[in-house]
Every structure is written in C-alpha cells, then in structure tokens.
C-alpha cells in the first residue's frame, strides 16, 4: 500500500503560512510591541492591505502564532501516548527535546511570555490558561507516580509541577544565551531522577519526532 500524500495547500493557505512564519521570526526577534503589521507584511512580501485580507489585526496574528505549536502539543498531551502518568511525563520531556531544534519558537515564547505578565497584553490570558493546564496535567501525573513508588515519595505534587515548569522555562533562557553549554533535556531528566522517580526516557527521545501542524483555515 502506498503512503497517502498530504493534501496540497491552497494559495491562500500558503500565504497565511508565510505571514505566520514572518510574524514568528519578527516577534521572536523584537517582541510584540516593537513590531508593526507593516513590518510583518513587508517581511512576508505582501502589502499591508494584503496581510489584513488574511488577519484582522496584530493581536489576532499573535494568538495564531502562539496557537500553531500548541495545536500539536495539545494533541500529544491529550492523546493515547500521554494517557498514563509515565506517558505524560515522557511526552513533556519530549517537548524539551523538540524545543532544542526550534530556537525561533523558543525565543518567541521566552520574549512574549515576559511581556505578557502585563494583564493588558493580548497574550496574557493565553499564557495564564497555558500554565494552568500544564500545572494540572503535571500535578495529576506526579500524584500518581509518587503514590505508586515503593516506598511512596513524600513530595508535594503541585509544588513539584510548578518547579518543573520553572526549571523548563529557566533552562530555555540559558539555552538561548549559550546553547552549546546547556542541555535542557539532560537537566530535566536529572531533575526527575533526583525526585526518586525511575524515569527512563526512550533511547531516541532527544531526536523525538513531533508531527508538523498545518494551519487550519476557515
């Protein structure tokens, strides 16, 4: 049986993808407030009016940029491979491996998440909701893993979930500054093992493939 090829993108879909790629690069480089729609349009080889035909404003564009990777992550976090606490943890560590091959997106998250602490920032609610979901998922996984250890591990699951997210975020900043000196994947695995968990990521975890997402269009 031959493998079915992915459907070809329409001209409009290709244009939207090009705009999102340009916005990702410029937001990563300069942040949200320093970049204008005209900057993004010029980078994408479009007129300002041409960009507005696909996206109504800069806030909408930012949310679409942030959500493009989250569509992939959500499918993995709530998919069958993450149905067990061990699977969820392996999936989360897999994100760390994946991020080491996408410095542009990591830079975008670091820069925009820092700006988004302002409640008036258009991405503020996005990051609040994102961290809430991750905390809940990890807290549930750690609760089960600590309880089923022999003997049970005396850690606060909610606190450990926050510590892990803080570690992952802090490592991203260090890695962006000095990528050759920081192995984010190894550091997160070491953290889990220091908790007393018998965590063994798959042998190919550092080269884990994450499915590519195709922008969905109305």
Image (tube, rainbow, N blue to C red):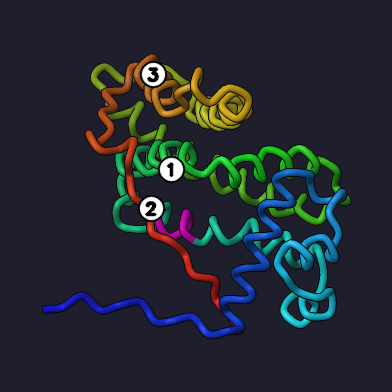
Q: At 46% across and 59% down in the image, what residue appears?
A: 72
Q: Are marks 3 and 2 in contact (CB under 8 Å)?
A: no
Q: Which residue is situated farthest in the left direction here?
A: 1
Q: Which residue is mark 2?
A: 210
Q: Which residues are magenta?
A: 72-76
- In magenta segment, residue 161: no
Mark positioned earlier in the residue sequence (3 or 2): 3
Between 81 and 149, the residue placed more toward the observer is: 81
Closer mark to the observer between disc 3 and disc 1: 1
Q: At 80% across and 41% down in the image, what residue appears?
A: 115
Image quarter of residue 113: top right
* Camera sees residue 98: yes
Image quarter of residue 150: top left
Distance CA(mark 3)–CA(mark 1)? 18 Å
Image quarter of residue 134: top right
Q: Which residue is mark 3?
A: 190
Q: Main secondary structure of the magenta part?
A: helix
């Amino acid at each position: 049986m031959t493998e079915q090829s992915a459907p070809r993108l329409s001209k409009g879909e290709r244009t939207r993808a090009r705009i999102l790629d340009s916005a990702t690069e410029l937001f990563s480089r300069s942040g949200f407030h320093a970049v204008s729609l005209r900057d993004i349009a010029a980078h994408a080889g479009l007129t300002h009016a041409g960009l507005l035909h696909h996206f109504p404003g800069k806030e909408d564009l930012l949310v679409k940029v942030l959500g493009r990777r989250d569509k992939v992550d959500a499918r993995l976090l709530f998919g069958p491979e993450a149905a067990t606490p061990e699977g969820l943890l392996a999936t989360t560590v897999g994100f760390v491996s994946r991020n080491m091959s996408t410095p542009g997106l990591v830079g975008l998250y670091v820069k925009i998440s820092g700006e988004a602490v302002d409640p008036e920032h258009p991405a503020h609610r996005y990051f609040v909701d994102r961290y809430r979901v991750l905390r809940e998922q990890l807290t549930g996984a750690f609760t089960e893993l600590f309880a089923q250890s022999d003997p049970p591990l005396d850690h606060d699951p909610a606190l450990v979930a926050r510590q892990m997210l803080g570690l992952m975020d802090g490592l991203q900043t260090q890695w962006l500054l000095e990528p050759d000196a920081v192995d984010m994947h190894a550091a997160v695995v070491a953290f889990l093992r220091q908790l007393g968990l018998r965590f063994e990521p798959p042998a190919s975890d550092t080269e884990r493939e994450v499915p590519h997402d195709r922008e969905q269009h109305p």
